[in-house]
Amino acid sequence: MNSASVNQSTTGSGAGIAEPDMPMPGGDAQKRLIEACNSNASLYELYLQLPKLADDLESDATLKRNGFSVIETVKALRKGNSWAMCELLHSIPSDVAKSIVRGTVAYDIEHGQFSCYETPVRNSVFKDQIPGVYVVSISRFRTTPQGRDNFDGRFLNGKEMKMVIADINKYIDGYNCHVQFQKDLHDGKVTSIQDLSALDAQVVDHLKTVDGYAHVGGQWSSPVYIKKQSHIQKHEALVKTLTTMCNSDPTGTVRMKQGPLYVGCSKDLGKRTQVYNQDNIKDINKPLGLFLSILRKLDLDVKVNVRVVLRTWKRDQLAIAEQLVTTLAGSLVFQYGFNATESGGTGSHTVKSAESLRINTECIMSHKQYMRDNLKGTLFELEQREAFLQILDQTKSDARQLADALKRCADRLIALPKNIKWTEKLDELRKVHSRLRDDLRKKEENLKLLDLLLDIQKMVFEETGKPIIRLK
């Protein structure tokens, strides 16, 4: 994980203060994705990265060390599913896909640069469940006498994240004390909560306080966000991500555009997307739920942005669609997000309503231009790359022809009679030779440039395993 340097910001609520470069907790893989987004208007380069991302996930030491399975995601990203992934990727609005990769979703929403699908609402007219994938992002705000300050759509600053980190660690301590207390109670070593030490009683009280902000209701009986020991690892992974973000700004006062994301899918987007902004958040992803409960406890107001980024139009798409977006976002908790389990757990045949799929097909293929525009962009790029290869072949052919012509000239000069009257032919030959030599030099210079670009093309092929142009 890399910490970042500090630049000057002149935008938003933080105008005139130092702004850290976006941290790259995803390391080289995230940098590669961002470069693919920045260097191309189309999504084709991003698509070429998918097999490489499968390799990265499969060999990820952190995931292996924590026993976090990504087998199904790796399978989905492999070449066998290349067309399925291609069409799903191209159905995501281009700016949305790039925002997800950069981790700037909340910031881009605030600035009106996140044109996604509308969240479906079920009513007396539209009664069908709509399947798809959504992304949850978080940004800070505060209410002032002058009105609401949205902090430019930015995430927490370093000082706030350190308070959250301390409370997450204290929550984990509270859970461990609670488990030990229950064991001691069962073994007859203690008889009541009064038998706890002052420090243990404090962390258990903290545990219950944080759980109270989940607004579950009823009497507290067990921890909300940690049900077993393996859950602790996932909260600790979130702490690691937040710590990395803190380290990018030594002042602790600067808010970054980037923030961790949660990716989810549902066969009923209208219903599922509502749960993240309700008082009772016990049923949402546990790292995200704990994070939001602690923010409530610390009285740090945040906007929880839930946006639909992809709608599925085939029965078997929902699982791999979630795997695609999760991979682009790097949102697994052992990467730099909130997702605590491998995506795609809904299965390949969760969606059974033909009418839901029809509605989404009509939306994607007719009402919205996202897929059409993205495919046009990719086809244009493929045509440009194919034209480049044709120019390269033609230049090589021209250079060979010029070299052959020069050789023939040289051979004929050698074969000329020794008593030839050079004064009559010299000027003409000199002009012809000079013109051919100039043409050859220009072709050779062009060929060097094209060979360099070809080397780059080969490097891309070796990195991604994908051909650069579409074979006819």
Image (tube, rainbow, N blue to C red):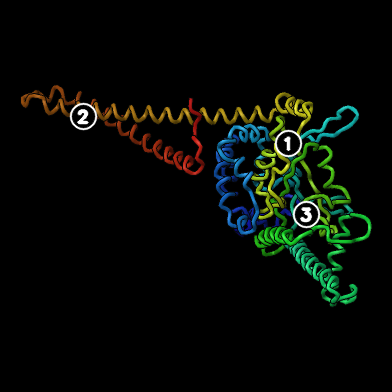
> For mark 1, what is the residue?
115
As drawn, 295 above or below 394: below
The residue carrying mark 2 is 407
- Residue at the spot x=51%, y=41% of the render? 464
User: Whole-Å distance between the Cαs marked 3 and 2?
Assistant: 76 Å
Q: Mark 1 is on which residue type?
A: Ser
Q: Position of residue 126 (x, y in %)?
A: 86, 28
Q: Can you tell which mark lies on residue 286?
A: 3
Q: Taking 462 as reference, is 362 above or below it?
A: above
Whether 66 is drawn above or below 353: the answer is: below
Q: Residue furthest right?
A: 218
Residue 242 visible? The answer is no
**Pair 3/2: label in front:** 3
Q: Secondary structure at mark 3?
A: helix
Q: Earlier in the sequence, mark 1 or mark 3?
A: 1
The image position of residue 35, as x and y in percent, is 57, 45
Mark with earlier residue (3, 2): 3
Of all residues, the one furthest to the front in this rendering is 187
Q: Position of residue 195 (x, y in %)?
A: 88, 77
The residue under label 2 is which amino acid type?
Answer: Lys
Q: Tell me where residue 41 appears, x and y as whole percent.
A: 59, 35
Residue drawn at 55 percent across, 38 percent down: 48
Label 2 to label 1, Cα distance in Å? 62 Å
